Image: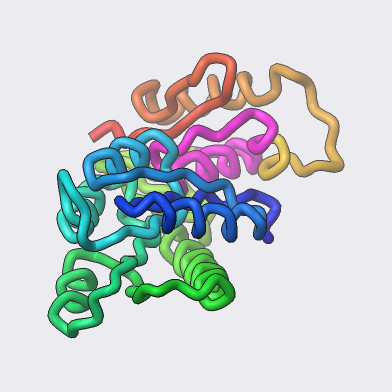
């Protein structure tokens, strides 16, 4: 498992399947959330922002195809892994799921070891894709280039100190995600470095001075998140 535990959301209207998958994923150390229909699945997904969603196709309220279509229309779920679960194996069902943005299709009955293996493979693939995708981040007039360690606003380069850039890129790499203070310390300053309690706040203030106050939001008592100002 990675240092950061992956959040997995299971959306299925069959309670025994929910409990079965949840039990097996939690044994592997995943942080698991569940929902019993499509509408509830969307609500939970927006609340917890999981890295991976296991989505049943045939459900009440809203079917899995429509749930996937709805989530993919939200910028926060562009990179989220969505794997469909279904007893239906017809080609047209699989094609429909992949056409709306599904990453994989897992047929029931579910075998735990195979499911875990597929999930691990999907998460590894997503991590590699994310590394490539996040080299250049564009939010309207703001462009953040990791490879060049540069920040541009309206084609004008803004000077950034090393830690300032690392903090900005971390937050911007996952818009909408709330980064807790300890996670920020670990990823920007490292676990072996001792810094003052106000270090993050000082750096956040400097970022806002340079790119404006609309992008970085304070989540009181928890940490910070990045939101596109578009």
- Determine which quarter of the picture holds residue 230: top left
- Residue 230 visible somewhere in the drawing: yes
Q: Nearer the viewer, residue 119 or 220?
A: 119
- Residue 124 visible somewhere in the drawing: no
Q: Residue at x 58, y 22 (%)?
A: 222
155 is higher (above) or lower (below) than 27: above
Q: Residue at x 62, y 20 (%)?
A: 202
Q: Residue at x 48, y 49 (%)?
A: 150
Q: Which residues are magenta?
A: 159-184
- Determine which quarter of the picture holds residue 93: bottom left
- Determine which quarter of the picture holds residue 206: top right
- Residue at the farthest front position: 16
Q: Nearer the viewer, residue 162 or 63?
A: 63
Q: Is residue 28 left or right of residue 11?
A: right
81 is higher (above) or lower (below) than 7: below
Q: Is residue 53 left or right of residue 59?
A: right
Image coordinates of residue 161 in percent, x first then y, are: 62, 38
Quadrant, the N terminus: bottom right
Q: Nearer the viewer, residue 150 or 49?
A: 49
Q: Is residue 54 left or right of residue 160?
A: left
Image coordinates of residue 216 in percent, x first then y, are: 43, 27
Is 82 inside the magenta-drawn segment?
A: no
Image coordinates of residue 205 in percent, x first then y, are: 54, 20
């Amino acid at each position: 498992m990675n240092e950061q535990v992956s959040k997995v959301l299971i959306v299925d209207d069959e309670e025994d399947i929910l409990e079965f998958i949840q039990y097996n994923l939690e044994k592997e150390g995943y942080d698991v959330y569940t929902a019993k229909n499509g509408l509830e699945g969307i609500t939970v997904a927006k609340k917890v922002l999981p890295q991976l969603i296991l989505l049943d196709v045939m459900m009440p309220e809203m079917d899995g195809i429509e749930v996937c279509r709805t989530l993919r229309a939200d910028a926060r779920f562009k990179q989220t892994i969505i794997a469909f679960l279904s007893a239906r194996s017809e080609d047209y069902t699989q094609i429909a799921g992949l056409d709306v943005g599904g990453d994989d299709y897992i047929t029931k009955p579910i075998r735990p070891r195979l499911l875990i293996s597929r999930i691990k493979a999907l998460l590894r693939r997503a991590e590699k894709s994310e590394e490539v995708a996040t080299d250049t981040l564009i939010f309207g007039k703001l462009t953040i280039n990791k490879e060049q360690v540069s920040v541009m606003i309206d084609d004008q380069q803004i000077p950034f100190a090393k830690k300032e850039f690392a903090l900005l890129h971390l937050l911007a790499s996952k818009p909408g995600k709330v980064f807790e203070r300890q996670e920020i310390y670990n990823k920007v300053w490292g676990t072996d470095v001792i810094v003052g309690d106000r270090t993050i706040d000082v750096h956040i203030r400097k970022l806002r001075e340079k790119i404006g106050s609309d992008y970085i939001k304070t989540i009181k008592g928890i940490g910070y998140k990045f939101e596109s100002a578009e």
